[in-house]
Image (spheres, helix red, strand yellow):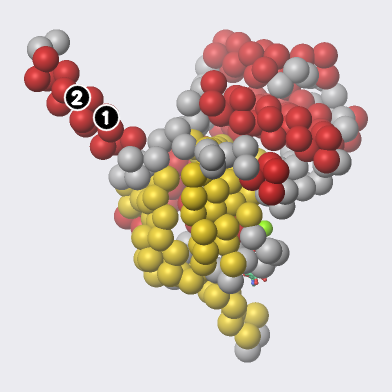
Amino acid sequence: MAKEQKKKSARKERKENKEFIKVKDVSKSYSLGEVEVKALDNVSLSINKGEIVSIVGPSGSGKTTLLNIIGALDYVDSGEIRIDGKKLSDQSDKELSYLRRETIGYVFQNFNLLEEINAEKNIEMPMILSRKPKEVRKKQVEELLAAVNLSDRKDHKPEQLSGGEQQRVAIARALANNPQIILADEPTGNLDSSTGEKILQLLLDLSKKHKKTLVYVTHDTEQAMLASRQLIMNDGTIIKDFLSS
Ligand SMILES: Nc1ncnc2c1ncn2[C@@H]1O[C@H](COP(=O)(O)OP(=O)(O)O)[C@@H](O)[C@H]1O
Ligand SMILES: [Mg+2]
């Protein structure tokens, strides 16, 4: 490639990597009877591709709402969200479900595994929904089971697994379709602190290894410090946004 062309494509890549997730002037309220709660109050935020971001803040400060609107699980009242340049409000339902399935992997506090099926099937499920061929699914499930160190538990159903093991299955499931973004809402909230630490480390290691953009919520300031960038929320706004030293 000619020098000029190379420079140009590097510039383009830099531009694409910036503002991979863009939240602009977003507000979102919930009304419960007479009471209106402003869960997000004019929030703006840009996250670059490959960034590892933690969110802390008191209960009710809007952390889950922020993750849910980035993950297209919920709508905003005003403002806009862009993922990889695409404005979510311009997307059809079909395009949004594609985004949720292929671009975003979600990890929940309470694991949210399907109780009736074993670990292997839980991990395979997103790929079945994406109509991936059987051989591709099988290979990917094997690799993911190994990555989360659960190859010997693949036939276990969720109730036959410990909390930490269930969350490892959920992490593998979130990675199944090779999404570019991982959103994790208090992924260690239901685990004892030593298991929680290991699970978060696994999530960080896999996200870095596969160059994912990771946004996770935690109550634990030590866990928050493991991100390259930390957000602190209060009352529906981001009150601090800084790079870890
Ligand atoms: N579905 C809902 N209906 C009514 N109020 C809600 C709903 N979801 C969240 N809220 C309110 O919005 C605020 C922010 O909630 P949330 O984003 O879950 O906070 P966090 O995750 O930081 O604890 C809270 O006051 C909460 O009670
Ligand atoms: Mg929450």
Labels in figure, total: 2
The vertical placement of 127 against 31, above or below, is: above
Image coordinates for residue 214, horizontal then vertical, percent = 54, 38
Image coordinates for residue 185, horizontal then vertical, percent = 65, 48
Q: Residue furthest front?
A: 245
Residue 13 tag number: 1
Residue at 63% over, 54% down: 56
Position of residue 218 in the picture relative to residue 80 (left or right): right
Q: Quadrant of ligand 2?
A: bottom right
Q: Is residue 69 visible?
A: yes
In the rendered view of the protein, which quadrant contains the N terminus? top left
The vertical placement of 42 against 185, above or below, is: below
In terms of image quadrants, where is residue 23? bottom left
In the rendered view of the protein, which quadrant contains the C terminus? top right
Residue 215 tag number: none
Image coordinates for residue 127, horizontal then vertical, percent = 57, 26
Residue nearest the viewer, comparing 45 with 243? 243
In terms of image quadrants, where is residue 197? top right
Q: Is residue 65 visible?
A: no
Report the amino acid beneath label 2.
Answer: Ser
Report the amino acid beneath label 1.
Answer: Glu
- Secondary element under disc 1, as helix, strand or loop, is helix
Residue nearest the viewer, comparing 244 with 13? 244
Image coordinates for residue 87, horizontal then vertical, percent = 33, 52
Separation of marks 1 and 2 at Cα, in angstroms: 6 Å
- Proximity of marks 1 and 2: CB atoms separated by less than 8 Å: yes
Q: Residues within 10 Å of mark 2 (few under 14, many from 20)?
A: few
Residue at 68% over, 42% down: 223
Residue bearing the label numbered 2: 9
Residue nearest the viewer, comparing 98 with 244? 244
Q: Residues within 10 Å of mark 1 (few under 14, many from 20)?
A: few
